Amino acid sequence: MNDFLDVFYKRRSIRKFTEEPVSRDALITLLKAGMSGPSGMNAQPWEFVVVTEDETLAKIRRNLMFAKMKGTAAICVLGSKRMQTNKAGDKFWVQDCAAATENILLAATALGLGAVWIGIHPVHIFERQVKSILNLPEGVTPFCLIIIGHPAEEKEARTQYNEKRVQWGAFPRTGKEKITEDDAVLSVEEEREHDIHDL
Ligand SMILES: Cc1cc2nc3c(=O)[nH]c(=O)nc-3n(C[C@H](O)[C@H](O)[C@H](O)COP(=O)(O)O)c2cc1C
């Protein structure tokens, strides 16, 4: 169990890579990890573009200002309206794709690979660039790029645990809050409006 938790702390953004290619088997393991992630109502509103050709990797490096790392592979996580299994994806696709992305990063760490998350959505110019480079079809939105390779740098494992960022239990009430205790209770109309089956 502790070995498993170590993967969380060992995962670091790796931006320096050797020239060794990432095997197809390893890439499939990463994709399985991504697709095993949680999603709202299991809508799975995602698709993945796997890039291993030098030409396309070079194009990404050349054009995207924050993706200059020389990985030997990249996975572009796409939000996918055309593949989502229900409408929950319309609301939750960003969270769903973030969960898939983190799963891929953790799996890369477990395999001894290095990886870094490059944010694309919601920056329109980055989305446009990725759409152009990967010739993306209608119905998908590039969420992020994950640059992957065999690591050529080591970083220390760490938790970043900070007690100051933790509130145990509800915050104490001062009586001056704009949101009151009554706001937790929904009217029948509000409940109907937000019925999960009508999302
Ligand atoms: C939404 C998001 C966008 C990110 N975008 C970039 C990026 O464009 N370029 C980059 O080098 N790192 C990027 N990162 C990686 C962060 O810089 C990194 O996670 C952070 O500095 C903490 O370091 P660690 O990953 O080693 O724990 C991004 C991470 C997230 C979650």
Image (spheres, rainbow, N blue to C red):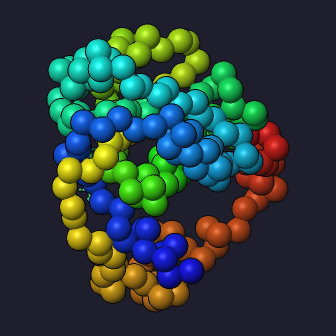
- Relative to 154, residue 128 above or below: above
Q: Which residue is more in the foreground, 87 or 77?
A: 77
Relative placement, left or right, of 89 versus 3 is: right
Q: Is residue 80 visible?
A: yes
Q: Residue at x 58, y 18 (%)?
A: 139
- Relative to 11, residue 1 above or below: below
Q: Position of residue 115 (x, y in %)?
A: 34, 47
Q: Residue at x 54, y 22 (%)?
A: 140
Q: Residue at x 43, y 84 (%)?
A: 167
Q: Position of residue 176 (x, y in %)?
A: 41, 79
Q: Position of residue 173 (x, y in %)?
A: 47, 86
Q: Residue at x 42, y 68 (%)?
A: 8
Q: State which quarter of the image contains the C terminus.
A: top right
Q: Is residue 147 visible?
A: no
Q: Position of residue 124 (x, y in %)?
A: 33, 24
Residue 51, image quadrant? top left
